[in-house]
Image (spheres, helix red, strand yellow):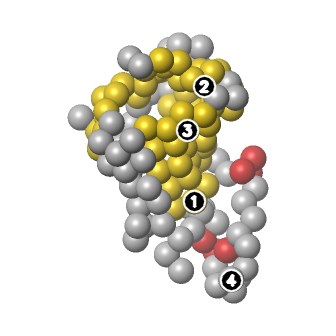
Amino acid sequence: MAQHTPGLESLHGKLGPQQSRYVDVEGLPWQATRWPGIETKTLFIDPDTGVQTVLTRMAPGTVLTDHMHVEIEQTWVLEGSLVDHEGEAKAGSFVWRPKGSRHTASAPNGALLIGFFLKPNTFF
């Protein structure tokens, strides 16, 4: 099975193909990204299709550089806020962006968000 949660392959690999994969999100380590102050936990990835579910933590003042959403991107802001040139998504807000949309996102006061991607972003 190509779909998995990074770091849990050995645990989930023991399950049958139709069994649920329970993920202890708290127990997953945060992974540094190439952007200072931004860390992620990949909860689900399908390398064959590009589908991903990613928990992202942005320290106050961090910026996610100019990028394009190759397919629809969906974000639910759990804490803090996410800001771009079109507006601000505050805690409890949900925002989705169409295929081909492009922006730079920042978290002036920090943010915790969960993103759902059909394909990975392209960064410029």
Q: What is the three-letter code of the residue carrying label 1? A: Phe
Give the residue displayed 63% in from the left and 21% down from the top.
Answer: 90
Mark pair 3, 2: CA separation: 11 Å
In the image, residue 51 above or below residue 83: below
Q: Nearer the viewer, residue 26 or 77?
A: 77
Q: What is the three-letter code of the residue carrying label 2? A: Ala
Q: Which residue is mark 1?
A: 44
What mark, if any, has residue 75 been given in the picture? 3
Q: Which residue is mark 2?
A: 111
Q: What is the three-letter code of the residue carrying label 3? A: Thr
Q: Residues within 10 Å of mark 4 (few under 14, many from 20)?
A: few
Q: Earlier in the sequence, mark 1 or mark 2?
A: 1
The quarter holding residue 78 reads top right
Q: Earlier in the sequence, mark 2 or mark 4?
A: 4
Secondary structure category for the residue under label 4? loop
Foreground mark, 3 or 2? 3
Q: Earlier in the sequence, mark 3 or mark 2?
A: 3
Q: Earlier in the sequence, mark 1 or mark 4?
A: 4
State left or right for residue 98 relative to residue 87: left
Residue 17 image offset from top left, x and y in percent: 64, 84
State left or right for residue 50 relative to residue 1: left
Mark pair 1, 3: CA separation: 15 Å
